[in-house]
Image (tube, grey):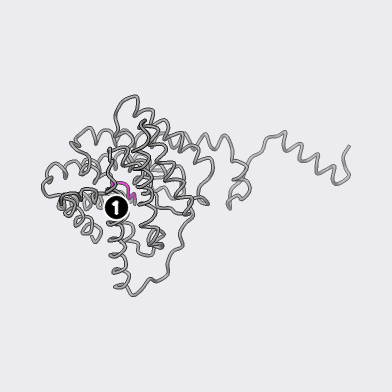
C-alpha cells in the first residue's frame, strides 16, 4: 500500500503544469518491488536505482531526437539500455522501458529524464524511512549479475524476438504490439529464464496483461480528472490480480499505468497488449525447443550448471575414445 500511496502522490503532482513526466509508468513496478522487498536485489543499491533508469532515459531520448527512423531508434534505444545494464552489472530491467518510452510515446522534452530522476530520488527517500522504521538495513541481498544468470543463446533469441516485433509494428502501424512493459517481460523471459514467474504457465500471461491493461484504461477514462485516485485504483487492482494469480510480475503495474500517459487509450490498447503477450507466450517454448536442439554454446559449456548434461554426437565420442586409447598406448 505504501507503493500505491507514493505513486498516487506523484500522479497528483503530475497534473501541475510542466510536470506531466512524473507519470513514469515503470515507477509503479519499481516502487512496488523496492518497498515490498527493502532488502531485495533492486533495493540493495540505491544509487543504481536512480542512476541506471535515468541514464537509460537520457540515452533513449537522445537517440529518439537524432534518429529519424523510429524502428531503428527503438532498437538502438533498447540496445543502449541493455549495454548500460551490462556496464553497471545491474538487473534493473525497467531501465529498458525508460529508454524505449520516448520512442514509443513520442517524447522530445529533456524534462523527461529530469522528472524520472526526481521520482526515483523520492522513492529512495521513502525506502530510507522504511528501513529506519524496520530497525536498519538488515542483511542486504547481493545484487544478481544479469550477465552471469543469462545464457548466451537466450540473448540472441531476445534480439530476434524484438526485431520481429519491430517489423510487425512497422507493417501494421500498431504500436501497442511493442509497449515498454512487454519489452521488460520479454527481457526477463529470454535473458533471465530462471527468474521468469510465468514459466510453465504461459497461458496466464495474455490473460494477466489483458486484465491489467483493461483496468488501466477504465481507470484512466473514468477518473481522468482525478489522476491520483485513478493511479491508486489501477495499482491496487493489479496488485490483487498478481496475488490472485500467484505471479509476481511487476511490469503488469506499468501496463495499468501507461494509459494515463498515452492519449486516447481505449479497447485497442487492451487488444494490442493481449495479442503481443500471446505472441510472446507462444514464441518462448519454440525458442526454448530450438535452443535445446542446437545444444549449448562453447561459452556455456565452460561452466556447466549442477545437474546439467550435454549430449555429443557418436562421431565425437568415437574420436574421443581413439584419442584416449592412443594416449594409453593401446592404439591399434
Q: Residue at x 43, y 34 (%)?
A: 161
Above-or-below relation of 167 to 117 = above
Q: Position of residue 165 (x, y in %)?
A: 38, 32
**For mark 1, does the 10 Å Cα neighbourhood hold few (<14), some (14 to 19), or many (20 or more) residues?**
some
Is 93 above or below relative to 163? below
Left or right: 209 in relation to 308: left
Expressed as whole percent of the image width and height from the top left, the position of residue 276 reads 33, 34
Residue 215 visible from this viewpoint: no
Q: Reply yes or no: does residue 253 show up in magenta.
A: yes
Q: What residue do we see at 41% from left, 62% from top?
A: 45
Q: Which residue is mark 1?
A: 114
Q: Can you give x and y, in whole percent of width and height, for residue 118 in the image?
A: 28, 57
Q: Quadrant of residue 279?
A: top left
How far from the left and from the top, in percent, is residue 319?
77, 37
Residue lying farthest to the bottom in this orientation: 135
- For residue 38, which quarter of the picture? bottom left
Depth check: give the residue in front, 195 or 8: 8
Indicate the secondary structure of the residue bearing disc 1: helix
Magenta residues, as a range? 249-254
Q: Quadrant of the C terminus?
A: top right
Residue 200 inside the magenta-drawn segment? no
Nearer to us in this view, 259 or 16: 16
Is the stretch drawn in magenta largely helix, strand or loop? helix
Total numbered labels: 1
Asked whether residue 82 is in view, the answer is yes
Q: Is residue 94 left or right of residue 232?
A: right
Between residue 129 and residue 243, name the one nearer to us.
129
Image quadrant in which the N terminus is located: bottom left
Amino acid at each position: 500500500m505504501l507503493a500505491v500511496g507514493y505513486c498516487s502522490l506523484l500522479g497528483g503532482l503530475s497534473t501541475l503544469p510542466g510536470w506531466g513526466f512524473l507519470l513514469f509508468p515503470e515507477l509503479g513496478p519499481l516502487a512496488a518491488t523496492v518497498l515490498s522487498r527493502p532488502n531485495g536485489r533492486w533495493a540493495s543499491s540505491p544509487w543504481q536505482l536512480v542512476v541506471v533508469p535515468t541514464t537509460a532515459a537520457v540515452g533513449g531520448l537522445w537517440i529518439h531526437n537524432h534518429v529519424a527512423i523510429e524502428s531503428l531508434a527503438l532498437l538502438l534505444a533498447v540496445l543502449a539500455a541493455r549495454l548500460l545494464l551490462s556496464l553497471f552489472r545491474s538487473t534493473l530491467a525497467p531501465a529498458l522501458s525508460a529508454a524505449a518510452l520516448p520512442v514509443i510515446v513520442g517524447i522530445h522534452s529533456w524534462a523527461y529524464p529530469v522528472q524520472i530522476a526526481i521520482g526515483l530520488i523520492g522513492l529512495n527517500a521513502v525506502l530510507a524511512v522504511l528501513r529506519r522504521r524496520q530497525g536498519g538495513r538488515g542483511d542486504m541481498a547481493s545484487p544478481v549479475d544479469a550477465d552471469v544468470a543469462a545464457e548466451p543463446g537466450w540473448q540472441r533469441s531476445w534480439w530476434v524476438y524484438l526485431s520481429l516485433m519491430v517489423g510487425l509494428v512497422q507493417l501494421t502501424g500498431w504500436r501497442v504490439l511493442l509497449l515498454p512493459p512487454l519489452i521488460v517481460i520479454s527481457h526477463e523471459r529470454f535473458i533471465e529464464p530462471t527468474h521468469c514467474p510465468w514459466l510453465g504457465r504461459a497461458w496466464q500471461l495474455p490473460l494477466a496483461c489483458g486484465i491489467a491493461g483493461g483496468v488501466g484504461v477504465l481507470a484512466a477514462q473514468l477518473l481522468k480528472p482525478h489522476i491520483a485516485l485513478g493511479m491508486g485504483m489501477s495499482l491496487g487492482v493489479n496488485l490483487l490480480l498478481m496475488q490472485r494469480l500467484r505471479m509476481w510480475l511487476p511490469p503488469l503495474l506499468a501496463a495499468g499505468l501507461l494509459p494515463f500517459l498515452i492519449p486516447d487509450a481505449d479497447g485497442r490498447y487492451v487488444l494490442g497488449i493481449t495479442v503481443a503477450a500471446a505472441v510472446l507466450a507462444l514464441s518462448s517454448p519454440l525458442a526454448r525447443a530450438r535452443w535445446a536442439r542446437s545444444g549449448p554454446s562453447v561459452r556455456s559449456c565452460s561452466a556447466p550448471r549442477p545437474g546439467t548434461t550435454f549430449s555429443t554426437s557418436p562421431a565425437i565420442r568415437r574420436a574421443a575414445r581413439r584419442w584416449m586409447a592412443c594416449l594409453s598406448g593401446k592404439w591399434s
